[in-house]
Image (cartoon, rainbow, N blue to C red):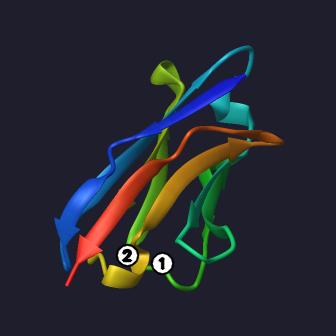
């Protein structure tokens, strides 16, 4: 199983970005839980949110109402739509499935 996050970049506060997590290997994202994490310099990794079977989602309080996780089963891709971004959202974002972790993508929010 391999996961690859993409879509990061530099954005101004208040802006939006959409990250993608493409999953390859013998799993179907429609019936499995895929999670997004982030890690800022000097900080521990933080769970941003997850999507599981039945399209159930959950989010960290810090991103609730601003971030949305969705998926495209045909593309085996999970998305993280981020809106109303804040400088404190600056981090490397990565996706996980069980103990598998993909390479992250850098998100930088300028004030």
Does the residue at mark 1 contact the one at mark 2 (Cβ under 8 Å)? Answer: yes
**30 above or below 62?**
above
Residue at 32% x, 51% y is: 18
The residue wearing badge 1 is: 63
**Residue 76 rendering spot, x and y as whole percentages:** 54, 25
**26 or 71, nearer to the observer:** 26
Q: Secondary structure at mark 2?
A: loop
User: Which of the 4 image quarters holds residue 43?
Assistant: bottom right
Q: Position of residue 81 (x, y in %)?
A: 36, 57
Which quarter of the figure is the C terminus placed in? Answer: bottom left
Q: Residue furthest right?
A: 99
Q: Nearer the viewer, residue 66 or 48?
A: 48
Q: Secondary structure at mark 1?
A: loop
Q: Please state if 82 lies on the left or on the right of 57 as rendered.
A: left
Residue visible at 31% across and 82% down in the picture: 86
Quadrant assignment, res 65? bottom left
* Image location of residue 35, percent across then percent down: 65, 52
Q: Residue furthest front?
A: 42
Q: Which residue is mark 2?
A: 66
Cα distance, mark 1 to mark 2? 5 Å
């Amino acid at each position: 199983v391999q996961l690859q996050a993409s879509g990061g970049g530099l954005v101004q506060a208040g802006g939006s970005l959409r990250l993608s997590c493409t999953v390859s290997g013998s799993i179907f994202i429609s019936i499995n839980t895929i999670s997004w994490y982030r890690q800022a310099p000097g900080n521990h990794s933080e769970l941003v949110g997850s999507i599981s079977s039945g399209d159930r989602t959950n989010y960290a309080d810090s991103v609730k109402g601003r971030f949305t996780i969705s998926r495209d089963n045909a593309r085996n891709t999970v998305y993280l739509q981020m809106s109303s971004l804040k400088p404190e959202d600056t981090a490397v974002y990565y996706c996980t499935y069980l103990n598998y972790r993909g390479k992250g993508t850098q998100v930088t929010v300028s004030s």
